[in-house]
Image: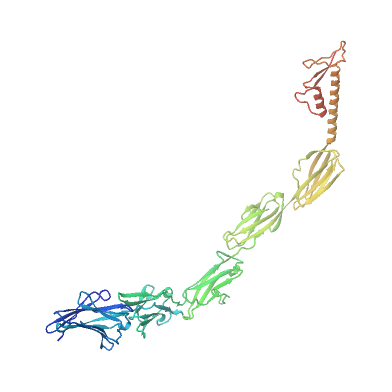
Amino acid sequence: MTRNSWSFNGAQMGLQPKLIRFVSEGAWAKVDMTMEESVEVYLGDIADIPCQYVFSEQARAVMIQWFVQERDSSRERIYYGDNTQQIVDSGTDFTGRITVSDIGDQEGVLLTIQDVQLTDEREFFCQVNGMAAGNGEGKTHLRVFDPPEASVIEGVHAGISVTNELPSRIASCEARNSFPKPNITWYRDSSPLTPTHGRINVVTLVTRESSGFYTVQSELQYKVAKEDKDALFSCEVSYYVPEGVRTAKSKVINITVHFPTTIIELWKESPQGLVKEGDTVELRCQGDGNPPPPFTFNREQQEKALEASDDTLVLREVIRGDSGVYQCRSLDLDTYEQVTGDMQLTIHYLDPAVVVPKDSEILLKGESLTATCNALSSLETATVWFKNGQQVGKGHMLFLQDATYDTAGEYVCEVTVSSLPGLHTSGSVHIIVQGAPQMKDADREVEMDEGTGKWVNLSCEAHAHPLPTISWTVTGSQSWREVLTRATEQSTISVVSIKVTSDITAFCNATNDIGTETKSFSIRATEGNGVIIVVIILCILLLAILGSVLYFLHKKGKIPCGRSGKQEITKENPNKDDIVVEMKTNTKTEDAGLLKGVNGDKNGPSDQVTMDTKAIR
């Protein structure tokens, strides 16, 4: 009788082969056999199945046979060998793909299977018969692996409502053509999902293809919440390989979650900052629901809906009456709940400036006036006064003291709002100063010298209100005419042209209903330049004649000269009427002196002629 004993050793499956020791005992001998529990290979690879045996007695002959277990649990021999022959059985699934060889220095054989197929995953039996030395049998399970194709995940395109009472299908995942069957695990973000009653369901469909491969399809049914709108879902496929277990993750998907609106926000999109009359205002409305519900706009305590476009309300050329509370409302079509958001809209304004006195005001010279400029506004204003483009005051009041004609003119007040530069207005008042005519330096007579025969222009400007008229009174000349008269708002200008024939006195008279002002001009007539030239020429001629006489007397010897250049001329019998002439000269030649006299040059310090006349008694 034969007794089999099983012995297991080795590490866990996939790390080291597990060996099984088979011991067969007869009446006089025994066989100790060792085989691996399983051998794991990839599809298409080579599988090596060792079969080791040890006889307790020396065997004169050894016969070895390999069998494979069929699906119906029967056995089919695939190999026979002894000391004389080795035969691979024909007509089996392994014919042409197996070989049996010695292990080496150990007693045993090695079954080698080429191009491993999925159908090769069976139990292989090794029978050893040593005749009188005993016989035994061992087995090894051949396991075949093939990884699946890349997993395919597909999410639901339609939106999923949080109001659904049961879990909704949100995604499916498929792992195709794997051996053995793979497993699929679902993840939300980085956390695995496990089936939970009423919240998470996982439906798995396993298909065995005709090729022997497995295809696994998994469907995730999930009860979504609002927080899932940003969640990422994925599936992970785990499959067996000879080295152990591997995993492959799919891409991540996002689902569309529908949830009702609970909060509505209404805000002013444009313009930025404060709003003034005349602006175009754009209000935007947004809720936290998905999909966004339809919105309606209205003013508080007014049921009438305002015309809007989707989530935008546009108010054109707003006025202060458009200020108030605006509301945005939505109606959830699933829950039929209405949610409202509101905001306060303030339209700022600045009314036209009101100036007092209005338009114009008449002042007498010396009077004072206080002008005011006010503009009603919803914001704080600043007022500045200008005259002729120059700032003359700040604040809404303008003080004009002791009015003069320079005070007259147009005063403009400009009102601005510093917090809203687009708001500004202005007003003006025209100040008229009334009084008698006034001329500059009227109390001082204008004096001038002009040559006889010349024309002289005299101008006169008088300031006054009412506007003065100017008249002229001229004595000393009959030839005069007014060449210009011009009137401005506060003054009259007149210009007369007078021919100087003798000394002239002219009076400019400015007159209006209040008084008169007079300004005088005095013109002293002088000889013309021609007379002066004639006089100069006569003087030159006289000097030339005198020089000629002296030169003639010197040539005749009548005027002897010593070294000192001085000589006295006397008679033996002088009388009281005789004249002594003394001449001093420093000139180098007489000719040079004569030429200088003719040219009219003045005698310099080195060219002096001194003539002294003395009476001789």
- Give the quarter of the image for residue 398: bottom right
Provide residue 192's location: percent of width, then percent of height: 35, 75
Residue at the far front in the pictured view? 84
User: In the rendered image, is residue 222 in sight?
Assistant: no
Q: In this view, does 253 lie to the left or right of 277?
A: left
Q: Is residue 510 above or below residue 548?
A: below
Please report the residue visible at 39 percent of the width from the left and 77 percent of the height from the top.
Answer: 151
Q: In this view, does 578 lie above or below 215?
A: above
- Give the quarter of the image for residue 528: top right
Residue at the far top in the pictured view? 572
Q: In which quarter of the image is the N terminus?
A: bottom left
Observer-nearest residue: 485 or 2? Answer: 2
Observer-nearest residue: 101 or 17? Answer: 101
Residue at the far left in the pictured view? 28
Provide residue 422's location: percent of width, then percent of height: 60, 62
Provide residue 431's location: percent of width, then percent of height: 70, 54
- Give the quarter of the image for residue 67: bottom left
Q: In this view, does 110 lie above or below 475?
A: below
Q: Is residue 103 left or right of residue 388?
A: left
